[in-house]
Amino acid sequence: MWVFIVRSLDASMIFTFAGLGELINQRSGVLNVGIEGIMLFGGTLGFLTAQATGSYLLGFLVAIGVGGLLGLLHGFVSITLGVDQVVSGMGIWILGFGLTTYIGSPHAGPLGLDRIPTILGISPFFFLGLVLVVITWFVLSKTNMGLKVRSVGENPGVAEVSGISVDKTRYLCVVLGGMLMGLSGGIYSLVYNPVWSYNFLMGWGFIALALVFFSMWNPIILLAGSVLFGTLWQLSLNPQLVLPGVMSRYIWRTVPFVITLGTLVLMSTKWFRTRWGAARPEALGQPYVKE
Amino acid sequence: MKIGRNEFKMEKRATLSGWEAARISILAIIFALTLLSLLFILADVNPLIAYREIFSYAFFNPFGLPLTINRSIFLLLCTFAFIIPYKAGLWNIGMTGQLFAGSICAFAVVVALGGKEFSASPSPWLLIPLMLIAVILGGGALGAIAGFLKGRFNVNEIVTTMMLNFITFWLISFLIKEGGPFMKSGGEGQSFELPKSIFAPLIKGVPFTIIIAIGLAVLIYYLFAKTKIGYEIKAYGLSPAAARYAGIRISMIPLLAFILGGAIAGLAGYHYFAAVPGLYKIPKNYGEFGDLAFYGIICGLISQGNPLAAIPVALLFGGMSAGGRFVQGQLHMNFGVDYALLGVLMISLVAFQFFYRYKFERTQTNPDKERIDVGVHR
C-alpha cells in the first residue's frame, strides 16, 4: 500500500509541475494548449542527455532549458506575431509529438542509471513541488509582481496604461511556465517511468491542462487536484490493488479521462459558474495588440 | 524597416484572396521541407536524394502509389472532419477518437451478424451499407458529445475531444486484446479479419471510399457556399455573439458541426480498417493510424478550410508520409520520419499564420526624385 501511495505522489508531482507552468501562463492571459508537446520534448531530450552523460543534473537542466525555449517560441508566435494562441499551442504539441518520435526512437528502452535517492520512498521532487506551489501562490497573490501578472491577464489595456509592460510580463510568464512544463516531462522520463517509448505521455499534458481549469487558477487547489488525479492515474494502472478482478485493465485506463470529462462538465454548469466562475482570467486567450 | 532603397511596411490584411492564400501555403510547405532537410543532413543523408526517393516512391512506384492514394483518401476524410468544426471556430482534434468509435461500431455490426465465424460469408449488399451507417453513427455520436458540451456548457472542445481520443483508444485495446469480443482467435493482439465477402469493392484497385471522399469535397464546398446551415456555421465561427443577435440558435451550431465532423471521421476509420486492400482488420498498431489523422489538422489549416483545395494538399501529404516511411527503411534512418515531417510542417504553418493576417508592402524610394521633392517642399 505504501508503494502505491508513493507512486501516486510521484505521479501527482508531474501534474503539479506541468499544471503550475500552465497556471502561470494563464494567469498572464496566455493559453498554452501545447503542454503535452513541451513535456514530450523536455522528457525526451532530458532522457537522452542523462543517458549519454550519465548525469541526472544535466538531464534535468536540458529538460528545463528546452521547455523554456519552447515557451519562448510560443511567446514569440502568440505575443509578438499575434497568431491565435490555440493555433500556436497546437503547433507546439504536434511538433513535440512528431519530432520526439523521430529523435527518441533509436534510444527506446530503459534509462539504465541508478534511481534518484528518495526520502522514505518519496521522490525529492514532491517536496520541491510543494515548495513551488506555495511560492507561486505567495508571489501571485501577495506581491507586486503577482499583481502585475494578474492585471495583465485580466485587462492588458488598463495594465499597459498604468505602466506595466504587457509583452514583457507575458514573455516572463510564458518562459517560466515552459520551463516548469519541460521539467515535468523530465520528471516523467527520468524519475517516474525511466523508459523511453514512443508518445510515452499518453495524455498527461492534456489532463494537466484540464486540471488548471479545475483549479480555478489557484495553485493550492491545483496541488490538491494533482494529488487526486495522480492517485487516480496510479489506480487505473494497478486496479488489482483496490478492486481485484473488476473490469478489464484496459477499461480502467479510460477512468481518469472519463472523470476529467465529468468534472469539466460539472464545472461548466451554470450552477457552478455563477458561484465560482469569476476566477477565470478575463483576457485569457486574447492576443494583446498595442494600439 | 529600410533595406537599401526599399522600404518595407507591415500592414494588416483586410481580405485574403484565394491565390494569395495558396501562395502563402506553398511558401509554408517549402519552408517546412527546407527545415526538414536539416534533419536529413544530421542523419548523414543528402536531402536532395531523400526528397527524390520520397517523391519517386510516393507517386511513381507501383507499390508506393496505391499506398499514397489510400493514405490520401484517409487524410482527406480527416481533413473534412477538421474543417467543418473549424469553420465554426472550433478545434476538432478528436478525429482519432471518432474514427476509432466508428470502426468499433462497424466491427460490432459484423460481430452481431455472425461475421466473426471462420466460415461466414455474409451478404455484402446488406453488410457494407450497414457498416457505413454504423461508422457514421459511431463517429457522429462521439463528435456529438464534444459538440453538445461546447454548445450547452461551453466546455473547451480541445480538452473534451482529446479525452475522448484516449477513452476510445483504450476501448479498442479492450475489444481486440486479451479475450475481448473482437479478438482474433489465437490472440496476437489484433482484431479478427473481415470475411472475404464483405471486402469493400475496388475501382481499379482503389477502394470505393475515394468516391465518398471526392463527393464530400463537393458537398462541403456547396454546404458553405450556398446553404443556410453553412452560412450559420460560418457566422458562428466569426462571432458567436453576433450570430445570436442574428437569430441563430447558437447552442445547436457546435453540436451540428461536430456531428458532421465526427461522422466523416468515422468514414475515415471505415476506409482504413475495412476498405484498404491487405488490411481488413483493426491491426495491433492501430494507434499509428490514429496519429496519421492529425495530418488532417495541417491539411485543413493549409487549405484554409476550403474542401476542394484540400484534395491536392492531402495527396501531397499522403505521398510524403508514405514516402517518408519508405526512405526511413531505404536510407537507414530512425523510425518516425513521417512523424517528424508532421511536426515540422505544423510549426512552419503556425509561423506562416502571421502572413495570412499581415502583409509586407514594398515601396521603392527613388533618391533622385526624393531630392527634387525636398526642393519643392522647401
Image (cartoon, rainbow, N blue to C red):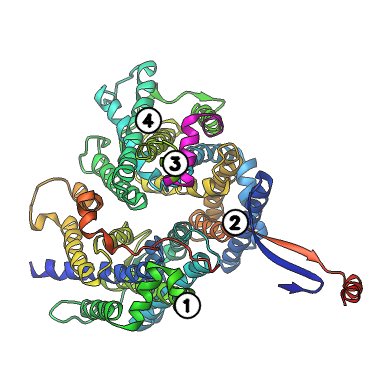
Is A287 inside the magenta-drawn segment?
no
Q: As displayed, is residue B202 above or below residue A50?
A: above
Q: Secondary structure at mark 4?
A: helix
Residue type, numbered disc 2: Arg
Marks 3, 4: nearer the viewer: 3
Residue found 54% across the figure and 33% down from its top: B217
Q: Is residue B73 above or below residue A185?
A: above
The Cα atoms of the two marked residues, 3 and 1, are separated by 35 Å
Measure the alpha-carbon separation of dots 2 and 3.
23 Å
- For disc 2, the chain is B
The residue indicated by pointer 3 is: B243
Residue position for label 1: A165
Q: Secondary structure at mark 3?
A: helix
Residue B239 in the magenta stretch? The answer is yes
**Residue under label 4:** B136
The reply to whether dot 3 and dot 4 touch (C-beta < 8 Å) is: no
Q: Earlier in the sequence, mark 3 or mark 4?
A: 4
Q: Say which quadrant the N terminus of chain B sits in.
A: bottom right
Residue A5 placement (x, y as % from top left):
12, 68
The label nearer to you, 2 versus 1, is: 1
Query: Bounds of the magenta span?
Result: B222-241
Q: CA distance from mark 3 to mark 4?
A: 28 Å
Rendered image: mark on residue B357? 2
Residue B246 has which mark?
none
Image quadrant occupied by the C terminus of chain B: bottom right
Which amino acid type corresponds to the residue marked 4 in the rendered image?
A: Ile
Disc 4 is attached to a residue of which chain? Answer: B
